Amino acid sequence: MDAASPTTSIPPRSIALSGVFNFRDLGGYRTADGRMTRWRTLFRADGLDRLTPADVDVLRPYGLRTVVDLRMAHELEERGRFPVEAYPVTFHNISVLDQTWDREHAMASTLPAADFLHERYTEMLAEAGPRFADALALLAAPGALPAVFHCAAGKDRTGLLAMLVLGAVGVGHDDIVADFALTSTTIEAFRAAAAQRPEGAAALAEIPQLFWSADPMAMSRLLGDLEAAHGSVAGYARAIGLADDELAGLADNVLTS
């Protein structure tokens, strides 16, 4: 559900901004024990360096305390970061990639999008599991929320952390996959805006089509792998270094009865 109808009090999931296109609320998902992720408490997003002054004003009522930026250091240097001067938050940069995906390999690939993404996501978890654990630990800390985590497009790095957060607190497989798939509804606005920037169209032409996919089957298969190997996403979180008290703290921060 990405928007509220006139007959319901459920808040919209997407936050309408002019410079950022994939800013979404992770509230409203039920867990196996009957609790629910809190609304207006934890958000996922694309590049927050693009927030306009008007966007910052839209976000002020949410009282953000923490921003976790999952991009690489050179991305921050080239594009900037969350405007902490205008909206004071505790800012953390935890890069979960050491280098961007190989574009030539992707251009030449004949894999279906789900297979390509499943391979890349499996590699990312294998290479950066402890860094994802660090991000989870930040979100589990007392007083850390409301918080937002993001990368450049809010799809891959952000999608993996969203999966880990939701899965670690007990949100079900299908809801996690559905949350990932919502990016398909926002990625075209992201691309259209990128094309309007200087040299944007030329830059977009160099990005393989596979990079834009948010095929839900990729996330479903990845979840199945984690569940088979570790019993649950929480089991995987423990395997990459998250302590039981941190898992409990994450649940306390994110869930409501």
Image (tube, grey):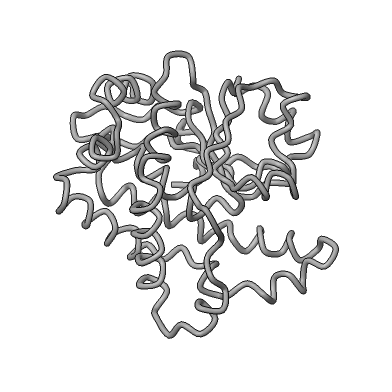
- Figure quadrant of residue 54: top right
Image point (38%, 25%), residue name? 254
Q: Position of residue 203 (x, y in %)?
A: 73, 70
User: Seen in the image, is 198 located left or right of residue 60?
Assistant: right
Image point (18%, 29%), residue name? 33
Image point (82%, 60%), residue name? 197
In the depicted structure, whether residue 100 falls above or below residue 247: below
Q: Position of residue 188 (x, y in %)?
A: 62, 64
Image point (73%, 61%), residue name? 194
Q: Position of residue 19 (x, y in %)?
A: 73, 46
Q: Position of residue 211 (x, y in %)?
A: 53, 68
In the depicted structure, whether residue 85 falls above or below residue 107: above
- Figure quadrant of residue 245: top left
Quadrant (top left/top right/bottom left/bottom right) for the C terminus: top left
In the depicted structure, whether residue 86 falls above or below residue 229: above
Total numbered labels placed on residues in the image: 0
**Front one among 212 and 22:** 212
